[in-house]
Image (cartoon, helix red, strand yellow):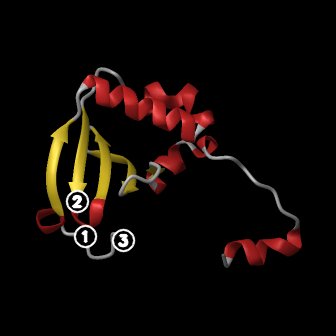
Amino acid sequence: MFKKFQSKESISGVTQSKTSVQKGIRNKLKETYPAIEEYLDAILPKKEPLMVVKCHEHIELLSVNNELLFFRQRDGPYCPTLRLLHKYPMILPQLQVDKGAIRFVLSG
């Protein structure tokens, strides 16, 4: 999806979201990822402007302080970026499998 991403060619528009839109995004994130609620103020500060970057192929990126946090395609759910998951790995549910299943989980 981001393999051939060129910022000058792939971005169609960057807008600063209104407070009401930002509140709706925060609520959607709380619904999708219940464990994110205690970290949400650190991830999306209320005082900082939330930038919505619209790209080709109906991809939307959420950015705060020039740091990409979430993306979504069309009207799907917001997905955290890998950089955000490395900072806050506890926002996604954790699964535990036995030793024999590791190979199959990693291969998809």
Vertical arrangement, residue 14 with respect to residue 96, above or below: above
Question: How busy is the neighbourhood of tag 2: few (under 14 within 10 Å), some, or many (20 plus)?
Answer: some
Query: Is residue 81 toward the left or the right of residue 47 in the image?
Result: right
| Amino acid, disc 1 | Phe
The residue at 53%/33% (across/down) is: 30
Distance from disc 3 to disc 2, alpha carbons, whole Å, reads 11 Å
Labels 3 and 2 touching (C-beta < 8 A): no
Labels 1 and 2 touching (C-beta < 8 A): yes
The residue at 43%/31% (across/down) is: 26
* Precedes in sequence: disc 3 or disc 2: 3
Q: Label for residue 1?
A: 3
Determine whether the residue tagged by mark 2 lies in a helix, strand or loop: strand
Residue designated by label 1: 5
Question: How busy is the neighbourhood of tag 3: few (under 14 within 10 Å), some, or many (20 plus)?
Answer: few
Q: Residue 19, position in %: x, y?
A: 27, 23
* Precedes in sequence: disc 1 or disc 2: 1
Question: How busy is the neighbourhood of tag 1: few (under 14 within 10 Å), some, or many (20 plus)?
Answer: few
Residue located farthest toward the left when viewing the structure as drawn: 8
Vertical arrangement, residue 90 with respect to residue 19, above or below: below
Residue designated by label 2: 55
Q: Residue 73, position in %: x, y?
A: 37, 59
The residue at 17%/59% (across/down) is: 11
| Amino acid, disc 2 | Cys
Is residue 44 visible in the rendered structure shown here? no
Vertical arrangement, residue 93 with respect to residue 36, above or below: below
Eye-nearest disc, 1 or 2: 2
| Amino acid, disc 3 | Met
Query: Is residue 102 toward the left or the right of residue 50 in the image?
Result: right
Distance from disc 1 to disc 2, alpha carbons, whole Å, reads 9 Å
Query: Is residue 54 toward the left or the right of residue 84 in the image?
Result: left
